[in-house]
Amino acid sequence: MSSSEIFRLVLLLVATVSYCACRRSRSRHPHIIFIVADDLGWSDVGWRDPEMHTPALDRLAKEGIILNQAYMQSSCSPSRGALMTGKYPFRLGLQHSVISAGKKEYLTDKETILPQYLRTLGYATHIVGKWHLGFCDWKYTPTYRGFDTFYGFYNAAQGYFNHTGKKNGYDFRDNEKVDWSAKGTYSTHLFATRAQRIVRDHDPDKPLFLYLPFQAVHGPFEVPQEYIDNYCSHVQDKARRVHCGMVAALDEAVGNVSQSLQDFGLADNAIVIFTTDNGGPTKKGSSNWPLRGSKTTLWEGGTRAISFVQSKSRRLLPKQGVTFNGLMHVVDWLPTLLTAAGYDSNDIPANIDGINMWKQLRRVRGRSPRREMVYNIDEVKDNAAIRIGRWKLIQGKAGKPNGWYNPPTGVRSRKVPRGKAPTLQLFDLKRDPNETRNLIKRKPKIVQRLLRKLEKYKRELVLSEPRSRMLKMSDPKLFNNTWSPGFCSEVKPTEDCL
Ligand SMILES: *[C@@H]1O[C@H](CO)[C@@H](O)[C@H](O)[C@H]1NC(C)=O
Ligand SMILES: *[C@@H]1O[C@H](CO)[C@@H](O)[C@H](O)[C@H]1NC(C)=O
Ligand SMILES: *[C@@H]1O[C@H](CO)[C@@H](O)[C@H](O)[C@H]1NC(C)=O
Ligand SMILES: *[C@@H]1O[C@H](CO)[C@@H](O)[C@H](O)[C@H]1NC(C)=O
């Protein structure tokens, strides 16, 4: 062979190899499917309570990586704000409670949010489901904040079939337009169907970010009867039986979307994340057992989230079928996903609270780079909590319900402590994840260390907006009985806005 022939052969080889590599991975950037369940408790899935019917979630979690110490905020808007920005809500003024219908409350538009970052890498970005980060002006709504499309609702809650919330305002949109055709159909079906359509119509060579925050399983407690009859008739407690039906429908939806990823060629280059937005509301059939407390509290039951990440690709997630015990917080998703997506670490903003966990998710061993986290600092409720290593300090009232509820059938519950709650509590989460023994008197040095750290964080607090009344100009009656943007400025909307 002459040298020019060898040269040509080498060229051909290089071309073939790079062609194959390129065919296999298609896009350099993985598809990201981020699924959020609303108010799903720690024990509301089959692998923690066998009475629940969640075959799809069980399978995905088992295939993927169960995140055993992944924390969220204790309620909806704060969690979503933290997910979108990578910052603690107390830096955003979002720390106190949720964004309410008809008020001048929103996630500040001074922050760049997750879909905006991903767009710069060429991602198509879609949100299907619940927004709940404000809509008094169009500029706070998803399609003005980095999402190509929006299908869902703006507020916190509504009927699952009538899509009507407070003040009888209908709240359901396809992009910016009110979508009346949703009326009468259960939202879990609507959102799964739309998500599947997005996956079907998506060019697999282009990266996809699909943010899928379901309405389920938030109140009101509604589900087509067949889900209760088919999967939950064995559940004794009535509230938990309905809840079980809602979870079963959610599970079917997740299974359907996962199947579509497979059917339309996205699965082998996709990362699927599943998490709740906060702990379950224990009074309505949800269970955080054996964790303490409920949604909206600083207890583990309000904040430690059911969560996993899954991928069909060993290239993306080499370790699968394992549990990751390292500490993670919702703020970590932003830098973690941006890194997975191919962002240069120098381009990830330094002023966020999130820590990039991508390497740990790929390795699933060793210590988490996250050693401490702030549960929240709320200057209105006058409470706060922080964790460093195994130690958790709660200052002020952790919130109620403050006991242990809805244990699996046959397991006896614990007695709820009575009397006035102590104003400072210390727990050793390594030995006592159920928060049963307050060690405040035994470990004064550790208490001092945690308090000092907390005080440091408090200096960075951005005050939350004082609670306001519902603005008259937000009244759905002014907008053909729909909840509609355009009331921030408190001037009467003109005719063409109606
Ligand atoms: C919508 O459904 C919810 C939950 O069932 C119900 O409470 C509410 O009254 C309904 N609203 C309207 C306008 O029908
Ligand atoms: C899932 O797909 C099946 C089969 O198409 C369908 O019957 C079911 O209603 C879907 N479930 C949801 C929650 O979308
Ligand atoms: C937490 O509570 C559960 C249920 O009672 C129990 O099985 C578990 O051992 C407890 N954990 C610890 C570390 O005490
Ligand atoms: C007003 O609302 C009704 C449903 O209540 C709907 O059928 C109609 O199309 C709406 N009108 C406009 C102009 O959007």
Image: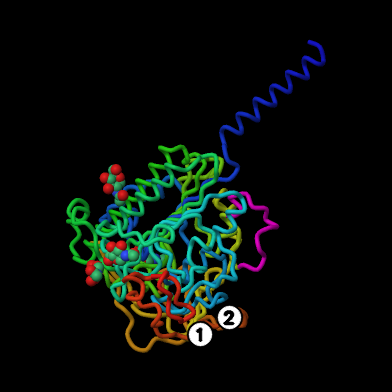
In the rendered image, residue 375, in percent from the top left (x then y), is placed at: 50, 73
Front residue of 166 and 114 = 166
Residue 477 on the magenta span: no
Q: Give the residue drawn at x 47%, y 52%.
A: 210
Check disc 2: other Cα within 10 Å, few if <14, some if 14-19, many if 20+. some
The furthest residue to the top: 1
**Residue 404 x %, y %:** 32, 72
Q: Quadrant of residue 420?
A: bottom left
Q: Which residue is mark 2?
A: 461
Determine the residue located farthest toward the front in the rendered image: 495
Residue 242 seen by the camera: yes
Which of the numbered marks, if any, corresponds to residue 379? 1
Q: Indicate left or right for 192 with 390 as reference.
A: left
Residue 372, quarter of picture:
bottom right
Q: Element under label 2? A: loop
- Figure label count: 2
Q: CA distance from mark 1 to mark 2?
A: 9 Å
Residue 46 seen in the current view: no
The answer to the question of whether label 1 and label 2 lie on touching residues, with beta carbons closer than 8 A, is yes
Residue 440 located left or right of residue 297? right
As drawn, 2 above or below 253? above
In the shown orientation, is residue 218 left or right of residue 271?
A: left
**Residue 157, position in %: x, y?**
34, 69
| Residue 346 among magenta residues | yes
- Front position in the image: 189 or 144: 144
